[in-house]
């Protein structure tokens, strides 16, 4: 019985080896057939980075965090690539290449999107097999129909953020020339300690909920966690919805694009909203500092 079992096992192994070799032969044959008559040597495109230009009085800061590029060749989607990008294209000759600037929605790497409010870069380029077309550093700006219902950069006499009646900590402006300031003369500044251990603020005005997507852009630098969300209003009810918790930034300024759309449409009948922020002092810290700047609500105006 043992001899018969060993003989059967050896025969089985030979059968598996033959089947594997035969499968490999079929795969190679099909691959050769697939590329027969088609271009098999790609051309390449390289993009170093994309920066933002703005009309400051109408569009606010040119600060951006463009991390990716979403590429279309002759209106056919090729893929999304992290910047700096170097990617192959199985085409040659003259083609129209469109590159949409991409961002991390809500600051999350897994939710990268082509940012619909930035203008795509469009070029007609000649692609050559086994050669690279260098697009270098490109620029974008906001789409013409983009609407900014609210912007706050802390550069004016007043400000459009109010602390709520529950808030113990207040909002100050960084002094002129302070190294704490992100850009310009001032940034918003909140200090939390054992006495002033709770902070909450919201936009002074309510804004209509549009029929399009809505993003909040902001720069922030914090040693404390901070919740950002929306307060929505109907004729008879109010709902406060947290959207994201911003983590400590270890002394670094960050730019984030927060998607408000789902939360603004979570409850039927809501017609307007405010942006709010709030937090308690983190328990492991004696004092915390929250810095923020360049708030923008970004959307499309709808009738």
Image (cartoon, rainbow, N blue to C red):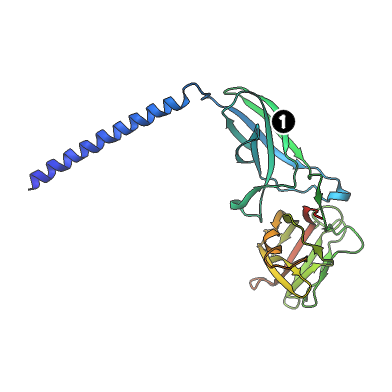
Q: Residue at x 74, y 64 (%)?
A: 290
Res 252 seen here = no
Q: Is residue 91 above or below residue 245?
A: above
Q: Nearer the viewer, residue 155 or 216?
A: 216
Q: In which quarter of the image is residue 227?
A: bottom right
User: In the image, is residue 256 above or below residue 4?
Assistant: below
Q: Residue at x 81, y 44 (%)?
A: 144
Instruction: Examine the rendered structure and indicate whether residue 272 appears above or below residue 301.
Output: below
Above or below for 265 versus 302: below
Seen from the viewer's position, the closer of residues 37 and 139 is 37
* Left or right: where 47 falls relative to 89: right
Q: Badge 1: few (under 14), some or many (20 or more) residues near its Cα, within 10 Å?
A: few
Residue 232, given in percent of the width and then of the height, sits at 75, 68
Percent of width and height locating residue 99: 68, 37
Q: Is residue 273 left or right of residue 57?
A: left
**Tag 1 secondary structure:** strand
Residue at 21 percent across and 39 percent down: it is 13
What residue is disc 1 on? 123
What is the quadrant of residue 277 in the picture? bottom right
Query: Which quadrant holds the C terminus?
Result: bottom right
Q: Where is residue 294 in the image (x, y as percent from the top left)?
A: 80, 56
Does 161 sit left or right of 238 as displayed?
A: right
Question: Is residue 87 something that shows in the picture?
Answer: yes
């Amino acid at each position: 019985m043992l001899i018969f079992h060993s003989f059967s096992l050896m025969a089985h192994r030979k059968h598996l080896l033959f089947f594997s070799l035969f499968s490999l032969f079929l795969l190679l044959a099909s691959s050769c057939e697939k590329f027969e008559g088609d271009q098999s040597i790609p051309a390449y495109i390289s993009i170093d980075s994309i920066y933002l230009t703005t009309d400051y009085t109408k569009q606010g800061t040119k600060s951006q965090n463009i991390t990716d590029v979403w590429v279309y060749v002759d209106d056919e989607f090729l893929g999304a690539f992290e910047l700096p990008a170097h990617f192959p294209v199985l085409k040659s000759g003259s083609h129209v290449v469109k590159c949409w600037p991409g961002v991390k929605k809500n600051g999350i790497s897994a939710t990268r999107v082509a940012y619909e409010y930035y203008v795509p870069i469009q070029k007609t380029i000649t692609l050559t097999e086994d050669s690279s077309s260098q697009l270098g550093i490109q620029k974008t700006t906001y789409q013409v129909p983009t609407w900014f219902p609210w912007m706050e950069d802390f550069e004016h006499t007043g400000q459009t953020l109010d602390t709520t009646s529950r808030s113990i900590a207040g909002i100050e402006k960084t002094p002129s020339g302070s190294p704490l300031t992100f850009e310009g003369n001032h940034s918003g500044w909140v200090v939390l300690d054992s006495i002033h251990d709770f902070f909450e603020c919201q936009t002074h005005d309510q804004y209509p909920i549009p029929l399009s997507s809505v993003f909040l852009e902001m720069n922030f630098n914090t040693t404390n966690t901070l919740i950002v969300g929306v307060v929505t209003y109907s004729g008879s009810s109010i709902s406060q919805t947290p959207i994201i918790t911003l983590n400590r930034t270890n002394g670094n300024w960050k730019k984030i694009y927060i998607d408000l759309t789902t939360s603004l449409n979570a409850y039927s009948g809501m017609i307007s909203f405010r942006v709010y922020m709030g937090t308690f002092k983190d328990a492991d810290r004696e004092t915390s500092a929250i810095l923020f700047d360049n708030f923008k609500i970004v959307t499309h105006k709808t009738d």
